[in-house]
Amino acid sequence: MITDEEQALIRQCMSALQAGLPGFQTRRQQLQMIAAVAHALGSCRTEDDGGTTGHNLALCQCGTGTGKSIAGTVPALVMAKSRGKRLVISSSTIALQQQYSDKDIPTLQRLLPLDFTFAVAKGRRRYACTAKLFAALDDQRQGDLALHDAAQGAATSPSDATSLRQLIQLAQSFDCGAWNGDRDELNQPVADGVWERVTTDRQGCAGNRCPHFANCPFYSARQRLKEVDLIIANHDLVLASLQMNGRGVLPDAADTFYIFDEGHSLVAKVVEQFAGRHALKGGVEWLRGLGDCVRDIVLGLQLDHELYRGARAICRELSADLEQLHRALDRTGAFDEKPIRRFKNGVIPDWTRNPGTNILARSTDLQQTVALLREQMFERASTEATLVTRLVAELGFFASKLENLVDTWTLMLADDSLQGVPNARWIERTGAKGSHDYLVCASPISGADKLRRLLWNRAGAAVVTSATLASCDSFAPYLNQAGLSIYPNVRTLRVNSPFDYRNKARLILPPMKSDPKEARAHTQEIAEILPRLLTTRGSLMLFASGRQMREVHALLPERLRQRTLMQGQMPKKEMIARHKAAIDEGGTSILFGLSSFAEGVDLPGEYCTHVVIAKLPFSVPDSPLEEARAEWITSLGRSPFVEIALPEASVRLQQAVGRLLRTVDDHGTVTILDRRITTKRWGSALLKGLPDFTVLAGKSANSAIAEIAA
Ligand code: SF4
C-alpha cells in the first residue's frame, strides 16, 4: 500500500509541475494513471513473498495526450526512492528514449522537490572499445605504410585515407578527454564500417584484464548506471540483462521497479531475443577463420599446441557436418518450389535431427575448447596485456558466431513437451542456385513463458504502458500473450484520451460496393472516391499493401497526384518534411503510406485533418513464425483469427486512427474504405476498441462525403 508520506510527496511533485510548467494542468486521466502506478509499485514484492500473484504488476493503456511519461515517472520516482529500489524506464524506440533523456527527465529533475540522478543505458556496441580503437589505428597506419612502400610513393585510396583520418580523430578526441567514447556523443558521425572496427561485444572484451579497462567507455558508463536512481533503457537491453541474471548492465530485477513505455512491443521483442538462425556454408567459412585465429593465438602467445590441434580437429568435423547437411537439403528437392520449408508443429525430420545432433555436440565441444583457450590467454595477460586484449577481440568475433550456432541448434532440438508450446522451426534457402546457402532457423512462438520466468516472477514491480495495449476493448489478448493471465491480481487500467473525440472528430464508414478481397474492384472504387475525400489541406492515406497504394496512385487524377507524396519515392523523413513545408506555405498535401505511417507519425493541426484507411490492417500469416503460431492455436481447437488476427488488427487500427488528433485543439475526420467493419460480426469489436468518435455510416456517411467534396 502507499503510505501517507508517499501520497503527500506525489501531490507536492504535481503541484511543483503545475507551478513550474507554463500551461501544465493536472488532468483526471493523468491522476488515474498516477494512482495505478503508485498502487502497483506500492505493492512491490519482497524477498520473503515468494511467488507473485500480480499485485505488483499493472497495465495502463493511455490515450494520446494523457501525458503518460510524466504520469508514469513521477509516482515511480517517489515510490522507488521511498522503497529503496532502482527505477528503470524502458521504451522501444530511440525517439521516445531521447524524449525521456533530453526533455522529460531533465525537466522533472529541475522542478520536482526530489533529488535524483539518471543515466541512459545503451548496448556495448554504442561505445568505442578503446583497445580496438588504438589497435585499428596502428593497423591502418601500418597498412598505409605498406601500401605507400608498394606503390613507391603513390597515394593511398581515398577511402583508406578517410578511415585513417576518422580513426585518428576518434583516438585524439578520446585521448584529450573531448569525447567519452559514446557514439551518440560524436560531433561528426562516423561511417558504420569504421565504427565496426572500433567496437566489440561481450565475447571480444578482455574485461578487467584489458590495459584500457580503467578508462573503458563501456565500463565507465556501466559504473555510472550502478550509481544512479533512474536508468533510461530500451526493451532489448532490459531483456538481455534479465537473461544474464543480474550480471548484465542493469540492476537485479528484484531490486528494480520497471516502467515499460511502448509496452505493446515487449512480447515481440522477447520472441526476437530468443530466436536463432545460422547459415550452413557461412558456418564453414567462419570455422576456417576460427581455426586460423586459434593457430595465431597459440603461436603468438606460445600456448599449449594441443589446444590448436584439438580445435582444428573439431572445426574440420563440424565443417563436414554442416556440408553434409547442406548436401542432404539439396537432395530433398524440398526447396525447389518454395525457398522456405517450415516443419509442421515444430517436429523436425530425422534427416535434419541426426546431423543436427552431431552439430550441436561438436559445437558445444568447440565452445569448451575456446573457453579453455581464453583462460590460458588470460594467464598471459599480466605480461602481454596489449597482445592478449587484441587476440581476445579477434577470437570474440568467432566465439559469438559459435554461441549463435549452439543456441540455434539447442532450440532446434529442444524437447517441446517440457514447455508445452512448440518452437517454430524452419530452413530457408538463400542466394542464387549454385552459390546458394541454407539458413537454419528456430524461434519460440510465444514470449509468455520467458516473460514470466525472467521478468514478472522476479521484478520488484512493473508497469506496462502504451496507447495500444487493449485490443477490441479488452486486455485479455495482451495478458495472454505476455504471460500475465496466470496472475489473478494484475491491475488493468484504460485511461481515455483527454481529447474531445465526440465533438471534434468523426469516423466515416461509407457503404462501399466492393469487398477488399476483390482487390481490383476495391482499388478502382478507392480511386473513384478519393477525389471527393482528399479535399482538406493535409491528408494521410494509409494502405495495407504496397501494390494497392501504387495502383491507386496511378489511377488518381493528375491534379491530385501532383500533390501526393508516396512512400518509396523518397525517405519517410523527407516525405514528412515536404508535406509540412507545403502546408506551411498555404498549399495542400497528401501523404500515401503503409503501416510505418500508422505509428509514430506526428502531424498536428492542419498537417493532417483527414486520415483515410484503405483496408483494415489484417496481416496475412505468411512468415514461418506466424504460420507456426496459427497452427499451434488451431491444434488446441481454438481460432487463430479470434486470438491473433483480430486483436492485432485492432491494435493497428487504433494506431492508425491515432494519427488524427495530436493536440487538444485538433479536429478532423477518419474514413475507413473497408465495408467489413460494418458488414462482418467482428467489425463491431474493432469499433469498440476505437476512441469515442461521432460515427457516420450508411446514408449519413454519403452525406458527410458529399459535404467534404463540396
Ligand atoms: S575493457 Fe573491453 S571494451 Fe573496454 S577497452 Fe578493454 S577490451 Fe575494449
Image (tube, rainbow, N blue to C red):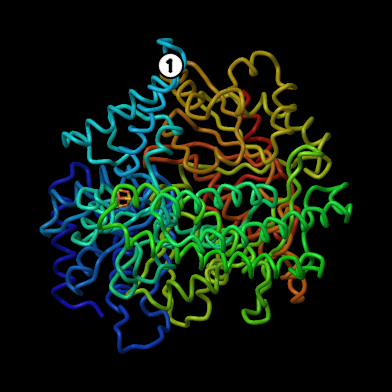
Query: Is 95 positioned to the left or the right of 270 in the image?
Result: left
Task: Using the image as rendered, state which of residue 406 and residue 344 is in the foreground.
Answer: 406
Check the picture and name the quadrant holding the N terminus: bottom left
Instruction: Tell me the element at label 1.
Output: loop
Query: Is 558 positioned to the left or the right of 190 in the image?
Result: right
Specify whether tag 1 is near ligand 1 (CB below 8 Å).
no
Q: Position of residue 154 (x, y in %)?
A: 43, 10
Q: Is residue 300 visible?
A: yes
| Circle 1 Cα neighbour tier, 10 Å, few/some/many (<14 / 14–19 / ≥20) | some
* Picture quadrant of residue 134: top left
Query: Is 96 positioned to the left or the right of 21 in the image?
Result: right
Q: Which residue is mark 1?
A: 156
Tally of numbered tags: 1
Seen at 42% across and 84% down, the residue is 53
Q: Is residue 677 visible?
A: no
* Picture quadrant of residue 197: top left
Q: Position of residue 559 (x, y in %)?
A: 64, 13
Q: Position of residue 524 (x, y in %)?
A: 79, 30
Task: Using the image as rendered, state which of residue 597 and residue 657 is in the foreground.
Answer: 597
Q: Amino acid at mark 1?
A: Thr
Check the picture and name the quadrant holding the C terminus: top right
171 is higher (above) or lower (below) than 214: above
Q: Position of residue 486 (x, y in %)?
A: 52, 81
Task: Using the image as rendered, state which of residue 52 and residue 365 is in the foreground.
Answer: 365
Task: Using the image as rendered, state which of residue 395 and residue 444 is in the foreground.
Answer: 395
Seen at 49% across and 58% down, the residue is 264
